Amino acid sequence: MPVGTLATVKGISQDLLEDLGAQIILGNTYHLYLRPGVETVRQMGGLHGFMSWPHPILTDSGGFQVFSLNELRKVKEEGVTFRSHLDGSSHFFSPESSMDAQIGLGADIIMAFDECTEHPADHRRTLDSMELTLRWAARSKKYFEQHKLEVPWKLPGATQSLFGIVQGGMDLALRKESAERTIEIGFPGYAIGGLSVGEPRELTREVVEATVQHLPADKPRYLMGVGTPEEIVQYAAMGIDMMDCVMPTRAARHGLLFTSEGKVSIKQTRYSKDESPLDPNCPCKVCQRYSRAYLRHLYAANEVLAQVLNTVHNLSFYLDTMRRVRQSISLGDSPQFLTVAKASNNADQLLRNKS
């Protein structure tokens, strides 16, 4: 799922997203709440009308963004008081207000308000955070069920859906408990949150593998905030159905491109006279039309088109990877036998440092 933080997937227009076959995109409640504001979006027909995207949209609860504010937030049982990263103004998010904002944004899939546990965290801190998330999940569901909207562009009578989020830090026993108790609350889909917060990638995989087995196989299982192309295949093989990550678009803006032959840092001088396509095995319009030399020139010249073309390719590569996963499953094969480019293990960390 491409990430469209501010009602836009950075570097690409909605018609191109449709051409690439994007089935669903994400919006970010925290950022949209601050700018342009939920009421503005509501008056413009919700996110679908506002950004002219007549396809599914998922919004996160804002919990992860509030978590990332660190010194600008204060967590209580009622909710979280935080200061805007834009102007320092004070705001308050609770399970109820998060639901109200997401309902107002008109998303098809809404996420329960949760607290993301930092890494590292001791057992007591992780346990307290998990318990708070469970209490907030129950409050989120109660408010949502009383106020959810129909989604008129879908089937008659279709309504918004609320997914629960499993927390528990890196503690596998707490992850199991969180999953079981979140299922008891009851949601039509379940997400694994609180990962990609600085832990080693090997630990991320260990936690995902241990957690997903406790989630219902007949309901969507959503892993939040991952990953590299090869990780998509690995997690799909574990039973994950949905994933999102800013990596393909963020990497594109920094000249890091994913291909079937490995990652390519297009900014490197060695590509300045390379007449070959970026990826000879990629059917996207960028690879079919432009040379590595031209893409390198655009990036070196700081042309806006560089970000656009890089983004189109990276999203195409990611979406094509997921298409091949689906095809593999439909043929009765395990996705784990698919081969994809081996992006470096520290690519996401490098991008975080640059962003």
Image: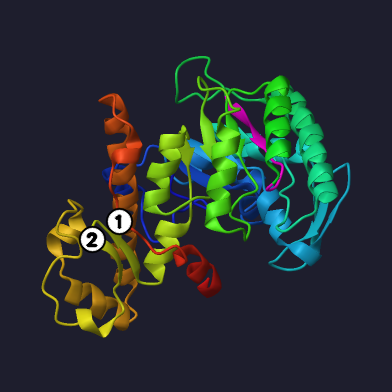
Question: SS for tag 1?
Answer: loop
Which residue is rendered at x = 37% and y = 50% of the image? 230
Q: Amino acid at mark 1?
A: Ala
Whichever of callouts 1 and 2 sits on the residue coming sooner in the sequence is: 2
Which residue is rendered at x = 63% and y = 55% of the image? 31
**What count of labels does the image hold?**
2
Question: SS for tag 2?
Answer: loop
Q: What is the span of residues highlighted in magenta in the rendered image? A: 160-170
Residue 54 visible, this angle: no
Which residue is rendered at x = 48% and y = 50% of the image? 3
Left or right of residue 116, residue 23 in this image: left
Left or right of residue 160, residue 167 in this image: right
Q: Is residue 133 above or below residue 84?
A: above
Q: Which residue is mark 1?
A: 341
Residue 264 visible, this angle: yes
Task: Locate residue 341: give its quadrant.
Answer: bottom left
Q: Position of residue 27 (x, y in %)?
A: 54, 47
Q: Residues within 10 Å of mark 2 (few under 14, many from 20)?
A: some
Q: Which residue is mark 2?
A: 261
Q: Amino acid at mark 2?
A: Glu
The CA span between labels 1 and 2 is 6 Å
Q: Position of residue 107 (x, y in %)?
A: 55, 35
Q: Position of residue 175 (x, y in %)?
A: 68, 37
Q: Is residue 166 magenta?
A: yes
Q: Is residue 217 above or below residue 252?
A: above
- Pick whichever, 263 or 108, lies toward us: 263
Left or right of residue 96, residue 245 in this image: left
